[in-house]
Amino acid sequence: MALFHAELKINRRHLLLGMSALATVASFAQSKGFAEPLHQSDSVSRFMSVSKILVPHQLNPVVGHRIYVALNDVEENFDNTIHAIHNFIVKTASVDVEHLMPALTDEKLQNSALKIISAWYSGVVHGKSGDHVIAFEDALMYKVSSDVMTIPSYTTGYHL
């Protein structure tokens, strides 16, 4: 019986090493690099190409995937709408949002395009059942003024 207890004896050093190893694995599993999708479906790729026309910034593919999922959840037939916007962009050879939006006369497509733009800038997708918060730090509304203003947060320290 004494031999059994001696084998299960855990000292503080082994406990701390084990806990730190688990914390490292957990933080890696939640990091952006690990959370990135391994491959994008055709629908998500089409959504990202439409987004690149609508939003003239460097777009984060992980945030884009989340926005796509949320918009697909709140808007009926969202894949068909993205396909129609994509086809319109190809047909009119639109290269940026300034040329696309005036030419986009279909109200449903125009509203969907505005929802996409709003989601990228605000980091929120608004739906009937509530709002889906997609991003805070990666919301583009903060990128526009990032050279003169920090992202509002409780974690930002004050410099006196």
Image (spheres, rainbow, N blue to C red):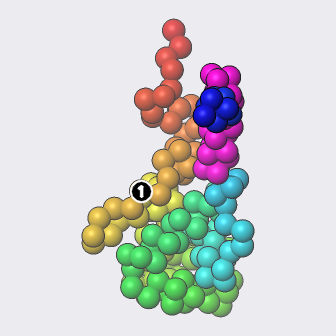
Q: Residue at x 69, y 55 (%)?
A: 34
Q: Is residue 36 positioned above or below 40 on the image?
A: above
Q: Residue type at mark 1?
A: Val
Q: Residue at x 57, y 45 (%)?
A: 143
Q: Quadrant of residue 45?
A: bottom right
How far across and how far down the image is residue 103, in percent? 53, 82
Q: Residue furthest left?
A: 129
Q: Is residue 140 positioned above or below 53 on the image?
A: above
For this rendering, which residue is in front, 64 or 110? Answer: 64
Q: Is residue 25 left or right of residue 160?
A: right
Q: Residue at x 58, y 65 (%)?
A: 64
How far across and how far down the image is residue 16, in percent? 64, 27
For this rendering, which residue is in front, 104 or 122? Answer: 122
Q: Is residue 154 left or right of residue 142?
A: left
Q: Is residue 40 positioned above or below 78 on the image?
A: above
Please name the residue that numbered disc 1 is placed on.
133
The answer to whether residue 95 shows anywhere in this view is yes
How far across and how far down the image is residue 130, in percent? 29, 64
**Range covered by the magenta-colored residues:** 10-30
Number of labelled discs? 1
Q: Residue at x 67, y 61 (%)?
A: 36
How far across and how far down the image is residue 151, in percent? 50, 36
Q: Which quadrant of the rendered structure holds the N terminus?
A: top right
The answer to whether residue 60 shows anywhere in this view is no
For this rendering, which residue is in front, 7 or 61? Answer: 7
**Crowdedness near tag 1: few (<14), some (14–19) or many (≥20) residues, C-alpha within 10 Å:** some
- Is 27 contained in the magenta span? yes
Q: Quadrant of residue 115?
A: bottom left
Q: Secondary structure at mark 1?
A: strand
Q: Is residue 97 positioned above or below 123 on the image?
A: below
